Image: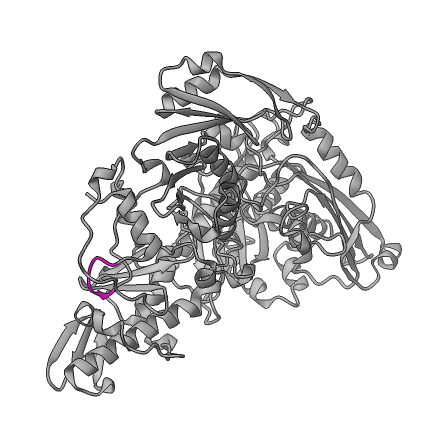
Amino acid sequence: MTSVKAYALSRRGFLAGTCGFVLSVTLPIIPQASEEDVLPESDAAVSPILPNAFIRVGADNSITVLIKHFESGQGPWTGLATLVAEEMDADWSQIRAEHAPTNHKLYGNPYYGDLQVTGGSTSMAASFELMRKAGAAARAMLIAAAADTWGVPAGALTIEKGIITHAQSRRSATFGTFAEAAANQAVPDNPPLKSPDQFIYIGKSIPKVDTAIKLTGAAIYTLDIYREAMQTVVVRHPDHFGASVASVDDTAARMVPGCNGVKPINSGVAIYADNSFAALKARKLLDVKWDMSNAETRSSEDIIAECVQAVQKTGAIVQTTGDAAAAFANAQTVVEAEYVFPFLAHAPMEPLDAIFAPSEDGGIDVWMGSQNQTTDQQVIASVCGVAPEQVNLVSILAGGSFGRRAQQESEFAKEAAEVFMADGGQRPIKLMWTREDDIRGGFYRPIVAHKLRGGLDAAGEIIAWDHCIAGHSFMKNSPWEDWIVNGVDPILVEGGLSNPYDFRDSLVTCHIIDTIVPVLWWRSNGFAHGGYAIETFLDELLEKSGKDLVEGRLALMTKNERLAATLRRAAEMADWGRDMRPGHALGVAAIESYNTCVAHVAEVSLDENGQPKIHTVWCAVDCGLAVNPEIIRAQMEGGIGFGLSAMLFNELTLDPGGRINQSNFHDYRSLRISEMPDVHVTIMPSAAPPVGVGEPCVPPIGPAVANAVRRLTGKSIRRLPMINALPT
């Protein structure tokens, strides 16, 4: 049995236990493994690191692709491994994937200043050419090794499904045969890549590399990992954001069998125990007095009122075209609308957790689902008093994230490091957050208010547009604050900034509102609330002008043909304009985000309680070249369900004293499987480089449904969630 220790050593140093084109033996973490289970060290020499740092070819013919982007169910392991398999001409059965080590110099994301971070739907866009070149380089090195071994010209060799063949001599061999020799070959500077007509895997719906391990339970998550003498730790956090510990009476907690200690840390009070049962029981018995001097004591309604008040005035200039003030002065009709969006949690299926243990070389081994490895590693090092390279951060599969695991200053990693050091830093700990900790733990999508004004001429044409946005900035007072320029947070306003409609005279402004409540990026960020406001308000204006809601949009999309084509396709799929069944209506929305165009048409009715029932959603998406169509469809379907949960039900509220009201899925509920609509997805053909799909599927679903509801009820839904705006 292979232990956690052996796995950590193999990942940290890329030690080899076999010969070949190999960086390390793939040693899986076994749940509840102990130190006694360490395999004896191999006498084999350490194999050289593969020059391109992304591929290991084993003597057993396996090909392990090191994925620098975090896998939490969105598919980068499969998508990026596909690119390597394509250019190597490997057999798909040979392909494996695992997270790359934490090393921003090798595995940085160019979209984020070379931080090793996953976000913004950039995984495929950032690595498409890189991973193809890695595969092509490995192929060339294998060909060169075979040519040298057989004494034949490299040009006389072919590869098909992982078999290298010399047709003239009728010799053939697998990759593993030449793995060791290939490691000594020169790395080609710019290996040629396949043309699209040569693709075997790209564009095909090949099986995901992690499906089998997840279906069988073999996939390892942080909660599955155990270390000898490890303590389970939970933290008692304050009920108010910004509060701190004033005093602790832990008398009753320490009497719980299995409770080993109670220690205050910056974020609350940590309880150390032999197991989770003892830790959670002891936490309930703590008597903590909190210092409220810096706490958030406003209600969410107070915060909303501040945002709504702000949008009554022009804010910092985001974007301006023509002369909006003059156009409004000449308008025949002016329509106004205000929108309010609540705090939203990410609510992934797996709450946050991490394991820390001292390593034999004086550093620290860490296992966690890290979406921002670089910052997590640096923060852990700072808290623990070691150099960043002494923190062996092993990225583990995670059960969802949606941005939750990529905090600006790695606050969860900091808490885990403080828990580890508060106990001396010599005994392994597992920090475990419960669902309640996660829902009540902050780092929400911000409260945001929008005010829109549209000016119409006598013919009903939109001649003026004014859009003001007010909300919290998670860039402010963070390492990312330099993104804010002249009072404009580009993430807060990205939905308004990316308005696809051609208004000759328009103005977009914003206000940044301060709050103690920690806020964070959330799947699709400002495109979700900004897109909702634009698409529902435009729908009202078009209807007021007597225009068709699809044709009216297309007439205004003069500068975005990709989005226009996507909208046309979605409308065709839904047979837009057909006679509807009584009590049913169609709603439409089209939004470009993260360079991906998505259009949704939703068929909606109202149930006996007046709540929307979504029957069918037709989705068209243009994400450039479709590397794996099935993953794209899955992301569209999942994003529609995620977006419907938020739009229909989700809201986090602070009571009049500033305390969070919600705590679990009973009062922060997700869409149930019986409520999921039928979804039909069309992927627009494209030869353009691929772009992201994890987030762009979310923004259009809310306004598409809201627009259908308005057609059914005559009521515009301008404050979410929808369940609060309609009768029950």
Estimate the x, y position of residue 44 in percent, counting from the top left: 19, 60
Residue 610 sits in quarter: top right
Of residues 587 and 687, the one nearer the viewer is 687
Give the side of residue 252 with respect to residue 338, left or right: left
Q: Which residues are magenta?
A: 16-21
Estimate the x, y position of residue 14 in percent, counting from the top left: 31, 58
Estimate the x, y position of residue 609 in percent, counting from the top left: 55, 27
Report the number of discs: 0
Q: Is residue 319 above or below residue 614?
A: below
Give the side of residue 97 with respect to residue 605, left or right: left
Give the side of residue 589 with respect to residue 418, left or right: right
Q: Is residue 223 above or below residue 281?
A: below
Q: Is residue 394 above or below residue 556?
A: above
Q: Quadrant of the C terminus?
A: top right
Of residues 209 and 485, the one nearer the viewer is 485
**Residue displayed at 28% across by 57% down:** 15
Of residues 612 and 394, the one nearer the viewer is 394
Q: Quadrant of the N terminus?
A: top left
Q: Is residue 177 above or below residue 508?
A: below
**Residue displayed at 32% across by 56% down:** 97
Whether residue 432 is visible: yes
Toward the left, the furthest residue is: 170
Secondary structure mostly taken by the magenta-highlighted segment of the chain: loop
Estimate the x, y position of residue 712 in percent, counting from the top left: 61, 39
113 falls in the magenta region = no
Whether residue 98 is visible: no
**Residue displayed at 83% across by 50% down:** 333
